[in-house]
Amino acid sequence: MGIRVEKKDIVWTIVIDNPEVRNAVDDPTAIALSEAFKEFEDDKNAQVAVLWGDHGCFCSGANLKAIQAGKGNRIVQIARGNGPMGPTRMVLSKPVIAAVAGYAVAGGLELALLCDLRVVEKNAVFGVFNRRWGVPLIDGGTVRLPRLIGLSRALDMILTGRPVYAEEALTFGLANRIVDVGESRIEAEKLASEIARFPQTCLREDRLSAYEQFDNNLQDALKNEFHHGLNSLKEMSGGIQRFLNGEGRHGQFQ
């Protein structure tokens, strides 16, 4: 129970498994979740991760019963970017995809926001449900949510705490794909495998440039993009040769 990691070649699936509390995260679970992401980040063979909650629920946030019992999540900022929910302050160099079924609320929403993409089931529900209890967003929610969906929509979620269902989440850009109930892990792992097939240096450099541009003015962001692009050039000759050999005609990605 807690956290388990299932590895399929270069794609790792990190699973939250606390069904009796709808995959709420207490301190031991947060620590285990952080350790799983650290292992993924440090493993040179691992390319893309999927974060999934078992038993039909992504994550209902922090375990409030554990907090009330004095066994709650640590609030101090811990080494290597850990937050109360685990890996929420990490800056990962590799893509992560959230596979969301059921509730992704409060701290669970913040875990979903840590991920680059979100594949969500038709029954998915996002929300700042902790608004009702005076529990703050302290795992990146007030930072990542406005950056992802814009300030107006983010404030709508943050101030009202209302549920946002899959279809609306898709219009917001909070969801990237909607799939049938029970299919989020399967489809997220397929997507992870597709992403893992691409030349990884270039993919990761472009990804980092996209994130880092938020911290820069336009001129500095363009310079930073160029810096990341230079790091990718060593892969380009192989890609050009594959193109010249006939791969990728008519926009094919196989």
Image (cartoon, helix red, strand yellow):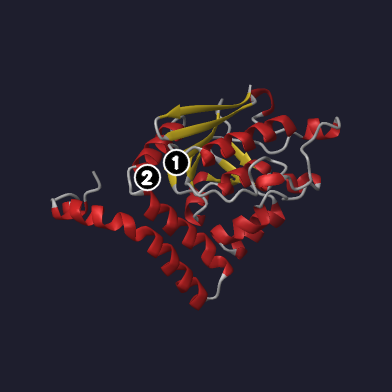
Please identify the quadrant where the C terminus is shown: top left
Q: Type of residue at label 2?
A: Ile
Dividing the image into 4 quarters, which one contains the N terminus?
top right
Mark number for residue 146? none
Q: Tell which residue pokes out farthest to the front in this image.
A: 234
| 157 lies left or right of 165 | right
Q: Is residue 65 left or right of residue 162?
A: right
**Left or right of 72: which side holds 217?**
left
Q: Give the percent coordinates (x, y) of residue 139.
A: 69, 48
Q: Which residue is mark 1?
A: 48
Disc marking residue 195: 2
Look at the picture and state if 218 lies above or below 10. Answer: below
Query: Residue 227 in the image: x percent, y percent?
Result: 44, 67
Residue at left offset 33%, top offset 47%: 198
**Number of residues whose C-alpha sits closer than 10 Å to that of mark 1, classed few (under 14), some (14–19) or many (20 or more):** many
Q: Are marks 1 and 2 in contact (CB under 8 Å)?
A: yes
